[in-house]
Image (tube, helix red, strand yellow):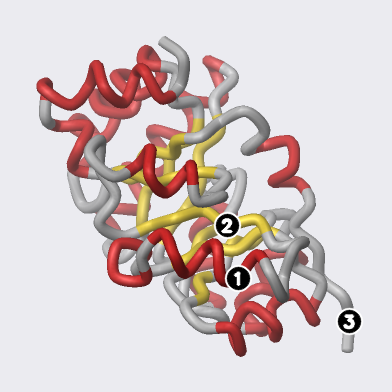
């Protein structure tokens, strides 16, 4: 079995407790919210690619991010075609809702560090056996903070990004449970939560 690593996230997510996710918002709105996130100190942005319009938005935000030294990834990458689209749009990395070794390998081969999704000990073990250390826990709000504490026992080398149902109200709790990065989406559209999120990144 060929080993696949994603240790690039050691640097990409170092000191970055929050990641922003903008799904299906189109070019203009995605750019607007990405810039809002960057102003808050949320340097890493993910745009899921499920439609042609999503890929267009990813390309626009990736270009803007590159100009400002920000990191932009492609989300909901579930096929080889998605990996190709992510690479052509200028993404820095890929994120998947589940763990598919072939998609992981294809992403790594394309020069895009893969962040596959896991929700069970079996999936964590399989992903780590492949060589991965950074994993997306999804849906994190349903798994709960206790899941991350439980996983740290048998898998002390695993580093988790919590995704799914994350917002200003619970992000701090998950970070306290050992999560390295929390991915927030619609919370960034609510002005009342922006100051709370800014506090989590030290702004």
Spatial distance from mark 3 to mark 2, Cα to Cα? 22 Å
Q: Is residue 149 left or right of residue 172?
A: right
Residue 125: which quarter of the image? bottom right
Residue 2 disc label:
3
- Quadrant location of residue 139? bottom left
Lower sequence index among marks 3 and 2: 3
The secondary element bearing badge 1 is classed as helix
Task: State which mark lies toward you, 1 or 2.
Answer: 1
Q: Quadrant of residue 191?
A: top left
Disc 2 is placed on an element classified as strand
- Report the Cα–Cα distance between label 1 and label 2: 10 Å
Q: Residue at x 43, y 71 (%)?
A: 97
Pointer 3 local density, CA inside 10 Å: few below 14, some 14–19, many at least 20: few
Return the x and y of residue 88 as percentages of the image width and height.
55, 52
Frontmost residue, 95 versus 81 = 95
- Percent coordinates x, y for residue 141 in the rendering: 30, 62
Farthest-out residue, right? 2
Mark 2 residue crowding within 10 angstroms, few (<14) / some (14–19) / many (20+): many
Estimate the x, y position of residue 189 in percent, counting from the top left: 15, 32
Residue bearing mark 1: 151
* Nearer-the-camera pick, 61 or 135: 135
Pick whichever of labels 1 and 3 is earlier in the sequence. 3
* Residue 105 shows in the view: no
Residue at label 2?
A: 160
């Amino acid at each position: 079995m060929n080993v696949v690593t994603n240790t690039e996230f050691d640097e990409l997510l170092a000191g970055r407790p929050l990641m922003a996710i903008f799904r299906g918002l189109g070019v203009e709105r995605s750019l607007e919210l990405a810039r809002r996130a960057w102003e808050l100190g949320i340097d890493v942005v993910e745009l899921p690619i499920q439609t042609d319009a999503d890929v267009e938005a990813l390309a626009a935000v990736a270009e803007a991010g590159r100009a400002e030294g920000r990191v932009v990834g492609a989300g909901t990458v579930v096929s080889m075609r998605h990996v190709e689209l992510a690479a052509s749009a200028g993404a820095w990395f890929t994120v998947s809702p589940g763990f598919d070794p072939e998609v992981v390998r294809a992403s790594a081969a394309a020069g895009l560090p893969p962040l596959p999704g896991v929700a069970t000990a079996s999936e964590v073990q399989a992903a780590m056996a492949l060589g991965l250390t950074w994993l997306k826990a999804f849906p994190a709000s349903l798994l709960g903070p206790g899941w991350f504490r439980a996983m740290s026992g048998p898998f002390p080398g695993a580093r988790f990004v919590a995704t799914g149902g994350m917002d200003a109200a619970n992000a701090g709790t998950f970070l306290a449970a050992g999560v390295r990065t929390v991915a927030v989406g619609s919370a960034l559209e609510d002005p009342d939560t922006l100051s709370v999120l800014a506090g989590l990144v030290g702004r």
